[in-house]
Amino acid sequence: MKLIQCIIRPEKLDQIVNELLKWTPGLTLADVQAHGKQQRMGVYRGAQYRMLSPKVMIEIAAEDNKVDDLVKILIEIARTGEAGDGRIFVLTLEEAYHVRTGFMD
């Protein structure tokens, strides 16, 4: 199994979730703040500082054979062509347990 972590623009969330739920039974969402190559500067009480951009992180535990399809969907929907479109990470998921039953997937 793999864990797909995708950090995207919030305005793309509904479209992505609607498509992902056709491919996978579940996912996890979290509001996050990120800083990448794009530079957003703010001023507070006369001092300049780097601002973090609001983003959404989606996590999906997926079977190995579904990863390429899921990543393709994420890229197609999330891409705007502008800086700040996000990142996708694919990690090896060694074990996953159900809290209710204590059994491994």
Image (cartoon, grey):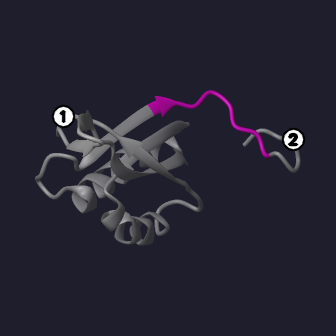
Quick check: is 16 in the magenta stretch? Answer: no
Residue farthest right in this picture: 101
Quarter of the image holding residue 9? bottom left
Name the residue located 76 percent from the left edge and 39 percent from the top edge.
97
Q: Secondary structure at mark 2?
A: loop
Question: Mark 2: few, some, or many residues within 10 Å (few <14, many ≥20)?
Answer: few
Q: Residue at x 88, y 47 (%)?
A: 101
In-front residue for pair 97/58:
58
Q: Position of residue 78 (x, y in %)?
A: 26, 58
- Locate residue 13, reporting x and y percent: 39, 65
- Quadrant for the C terminus, please: top right
Most prominent secondary structure in the magenta stretch? loop
Disc 1 residue type? Lys
Q: Residue 77: percent from the left, percent from the top?
A: 26, 62
Q: Is residue 23 left or right of residue 85?
A: right
Q: Is residue 98 left or right of residue 75?
A: right
**Vertical relation: 96 (above or below) 98:** above
Q: Are marks 1 and 2 in contact (CB under 8 Å)?
A: no
Residue furthest to the left in view is 81
Which quadrant would the N terminus be assigned to in this image?
Answer: top right
Q: Secondary structure at mark 1?
A: loop
- Nearer to us of marks 1 and 2 is 1
Q: Label 2 is placed on what type of residue? A: Gly
In magenta, the rendered stretch is: 91-98
Left or right? Give the position of 104 relative to 54: right
Q: Residues within 10 Å of mark 1 (few under 14, many from 20)?
A: few
Disc 2 designates what residue? 102
Looking at marks 1 and 2 on the same chain, the residue that comes earlier in the sequence is marked by: 1
- x, y percent for residue 46: 23, 39
Circle 1 is placed at which residue position?
Answer: 37
In the image, farthest residue toward the front: 45
